[in-house]
Image (spheres, helix red, strand yellow):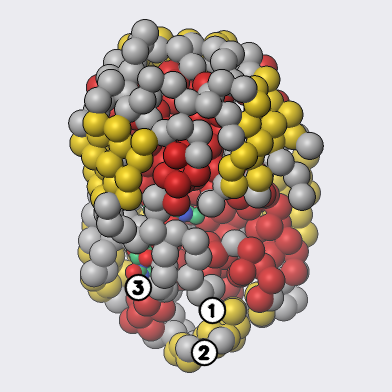
Amino acid sequence: MSKYLITGGNKICGTLSIKGAKNSILPLMVASLLNESISIIHNVPLIADVYTMIDILKSIGCKIDLDDHVLVIDSSNLTFNKIDEGYVKKMRSSIIVLGAMISRLEHVEIYEPGGCAIGKRPIDLHLNSLRKLGIEIEEGAIIDCKRKEIIGSDIILNSPSVGATENIILAAVKAKGITRIYNAAKEPEIEDLQEFVNKMGAKVSGAGSDFIEIQGVDKLDKVEHTVIPDRIAIGTYMVASAITGGYLEVDKIVRPHMEPINNTLIKAGCDIEYTKEGLILKSPKKISTINFLKTDIHPNYPTDMQAQMVALMTLGEGKTIFCETIFENRFMHCKELNKMGADTQVISNHICKVNGVEKLHAAKTTCPDLRGGAALILAALVGEGQSEINNIYHVERGYENIEGVLNNLGADMTKI
Ligand code: UD1
């Protein structure tokens, strides 16, 4: 199994160019099932989750070409109605294929995704919402979905789940009548999905707010689209620069998407200047504590940047309390960071205390999950000596060629 070796101490400096968002490209690939035609998607990140989604779509009959970050998906001929257990276990978010598949086919089967490292992660909101649209669902090890027609309906989400909002949109785009989602997720990736399906001819409005309306249409057309930049990948590299005392120019961002992260980095002492399309980060001499950071739904601070900010605060001047409100078990990186000399204490499933220390040192650590793995890389970039990071397949799910990107910016990092 591959691992990273990182010798800490080099400043991360230079210009960064980042491809599309992982959490956007996956639902867009799924949405390409809806038009029964060609979808061309630009700015595709070459990450493991994209390859898994390519395998999933191919397994049900799509023809797919990937060339230089451009995906061409031909969904005109679906030949299979079942998603294999292996795919669902590998990538829990494969559950979002359900909405689009049941829009295309009258009978669909998909394995129950089950829990994962960061918590139980139920799918009740997905399934109950699809039931409201007239889809019959039997739950077991296999989720068995049947429908005659999909009928628009009012759906009130108990909590604004990103995946459930996407699944509802995907199932409702070609439903009979109007679907309204109340308490919808407001994440930027939902806006990207709305733009993508509307370019096909769908009638979705309200994405980015907590009320989304979908007027069903009969037919959709081919589409060409560029994925939004990955705010979490950009944020991770900004922390890499900040933690090493470096400087980073990012060539392309969507400013409102970055602001929750940027405002926190500014509190930590970073200087952020916006350029025409991107930004420039200058790191402080000493990292300030941000005192308290709570993860929450957009436009608040994203849970997917919690672990990276914990890594930064291990070197903050003083104490920081983190409150994780989205997932129930998302502090597993703390134990690993402590192996590197950090002083973190997980108080409960939702609260963690980080006392800033003077310096970190190298250690042998193991990625607990995708963003936790990123946090270990960040700490290793500044830890004295050579760190070894194992289970890097987690990181490869969401970061394209992270060792190449960081080495270009001055890191000493090898994948072996
Ligand atoms: C998506 C992102 C993930 C991000 C998360 C929150 C993708 C591929 N993944 O995940 O990176 O961290 O949004 O921004 O886009 N919940 C239920 N029942 C459900 C669905 C969710 O209780 O049916 C709970 C979850 O267990 C979790 C919370 O709601 O505690 C938020 O989950 P959700 O917004 O659905 O996240 P995902 O779509 O899985």
- Category of crowding for the residue at label 1, using alpha-carbon neighbours closer than 10 angstroms: few (below 14), some (14–19), many (at least 20): some
- At label 3, the amino acid type is Leu
At 54% from the left and 64% from the top, the residue drawn is 92
At 53% from the left and 51% from the top, the residue drawn is 369
Corner quadrant of residue 204: bottom left
Query: Which residue is at the front of the view, 283 or 253?
Result: 283
Q: Earlier in the sequence, mark 3 or mark 2?
A: 3
Going by the picture, which residue comes out furthest to the left? 291
Query: Quick check: 403 left or right of 267?
Result: right
18, above or below 36, in the image: above
| Mark 3 to mark 2 CA distance (whole Å) | 16 Å
| Mark 1 to mark 2 CA distance (whole Å) | 7 Å
Query: Which residue is at the front of the view, 4 or 275?
Result: 4
Query: Quick check: 13 left or right of 245?
Result: right
| Mark 3 to mark 1 CA distance (whole Å) | 14 Å
Disc 1: which residue = 112
Disc 3: which residue = 125
